[in-house]
Amino acid sequence: MALVTPLALALLLLAFTVSLLYLLRKPTPPRSGSDGTQRQLPPSPRGLPLLGHLHLLGSLPHRALRSLAAAHGPVLLLRLGRVPAVLVSSAAAAEEVMRTRDLAFASRPRSAMAERLLYGRDVAFAPYGEYWRQARRVCVVHLLSPLRILSFRRVREEEAAALVERVRDAGAGGAVVDLCEPLLVYANTVVSRAAFGDKSARGLYVDGDKGRVLRKVFTDFNELLGTAPLGELLPGLGWVDAVKGTEGKIRRTFEALDGVLEKVIDDHRRRRQAGRQKGEDSDDHRDFVDVLLDVNETDNEVGIRLDTIEIKAIILDMFAAGTDTTSTAMEWAITELITHPHCMRKLQDELRAVVGIADHHVVTEDHLDKLLYLKAVVKETLRLHPPIPLLVPREPPNDAEILGYHVPARTRVVINAWAIGRDPASWDRAEEFMPERFLDSAVDYRGQNFGLIPFGTGRRGCPGVGFAVPTVEMALASLLYNFDLAPAAGTSLDMREVNGLSVRLKSGLPLVAKRIKPVFVN
């Protein structure tokens, strides 16, 4: 007779507890309006006791949720453990949430993970209120204005050139290069130089062990932000997070990032003080930390005090929005171009025509406005592969409505941007990669067309789109101007996905980067 293992005993106890809670739970009263009439909730598939619909999400929730929406409708009520959620999967429903009723849905649900990693004082996850309004104003006006973004042009051009050299060296002699790593280094370094300045970034992102360790910390940070602790969804099972090591990973990641940020901010304060004593006061090449310290000292209209905690939180927002997501967009763009070689040839022909074909020619940001097919490729990539397929949830503080359905207060509203970008109701040949659909088209990703919302829109839209897009375009243009990229002989790309804060390629992007020989002209 086999002995009962501790794990089996724990599972039996859990099953008994679930059944008991299900039998003892109080029935949910019907939702009624002020006139006593019952309000219509969105349709909902059958769930399980305690778990609700968690078991239906699978390893790739954006795909599973699209299948649920196809079966039950574009506005769907789910229960994720103890958390009620409304899933939005059509452009019309998204427009109602992010434009028609934007104010009603402008708040965020509490996120234990964001509070622990982002000090509870960031912008992206903050509830709607005075702090969020003023902190976002600081980001839009002071950090991410067109003029400020333009001031980092040199950073993007230099790091794009460094990316080309990194790929050239790694691929020497026909060696296979996993392009995911150099793309992530590029994205991290661009954001680091913008956030911390050249000197501090060089001290942090150096080749070798120190740079790899810090990149791993930021990778863990992004992965954790894309994770919902089990204890948040099922309060009685918080111990599972500790057993899995999630608690320890959160603590180690936070402590490592906090130490880095504390040192960088202290260094900036000392340098600024020394500069004042020498009479130096130049606005050239000010990084995000400098700007936030300026705001703290001089902007009396902010309405909030940017102490060290707030500066750290806002800087980490920039890393969350500008590293993993940016590199993911570049990975998918290259993947689609390789699997559609006629698109690759068309883009490379455009690059030769705009940039030139002489040995001394390099891609600069002056070329980007003329690279219309490149911009179409980026739009099509963001349509098919929005880096964050399920946008950061919203939460109405009061009862609200979406397409006639009642949404109770404090219900999470999740917008499936991935499903909306592939909706046949909005797009012809919706599953096909066709950059040509965006040539001579006014459709953009800035939120005016709700069939394409990779950055969200409305009050909670991402303010960093103007920083992210030229970062992506510079890297793609530089790589494809200099290299023919292809899988190693006898292999093909693995396009399977893995879920996190962004949805990445599961097996990386192993390619052979063949250097394109320049044409010498007199």
Image (tube, rainbow, N blue to C red):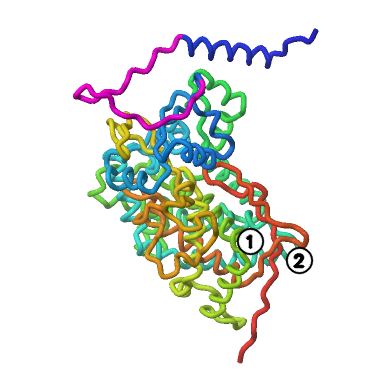
Asked if residue 491 can be seen in this view, the reply is: yes
Q: Residues within 10 Å of mark 2 (few under 14, many from 20)?
A: some
Residue type at tag 2 = Gly
Residue 398 spot, x, y in % from top left? 27, 31
* Point 22% across, 21% down: residue: 36
> Residue 174 has which mark?
2
* Point 66% across, 64% down: residue: 167
Q: Say if the magenta span includes residue 31.
A: yes
Asked if residue 225 can be seen in this view, the reply is: no
**Cα–Cα gap, marks 1 and 2:** 20 Å
Which residue appears farthest toward the bottom when viewing the image?
A: 522
Magenta span dominant secondary structure: loop
- Name the quadrant of the C terminus: bottom right
Residue 45, relative to residue 49: is it above or below? below
> Residue 339 has which mark?
1
Magenta stretch, residue numbers = 24-48
Q: Say if the magenta span includes residue 484.
A: no
Asked which quadrant contains residue 172, the reply is bottom right
Q: Left of 92 or right of it: where is 366?
A: right
Which of marks 2 and 1 precedes in the sequence?
A: 2
Along the viewing direction, whichever of 392 and 521 lies nearer the viewer: 392
Q: Left of 271 or right of it: where is 242?
A: right
Residue 1, relative to residue 388: is it above or below? above
Query: What is the secondary structure assignment of the residue under circle 1?
Result: helix
Residue 178 spot, x, y in % from top left? 68, 56
* Point 63% across, 61% down: residue: 339
Asked which quadrant contains residue 272, the reply is bottom left
Residue 182, relative to residue 228: is it above or below? below
Along the viewing direction, whichever of 179 and 166 lies nearer the viewer: 179
Residue 97 spot, x, y in % from top left? 33, 43
Residue type at tag 1 = Thr
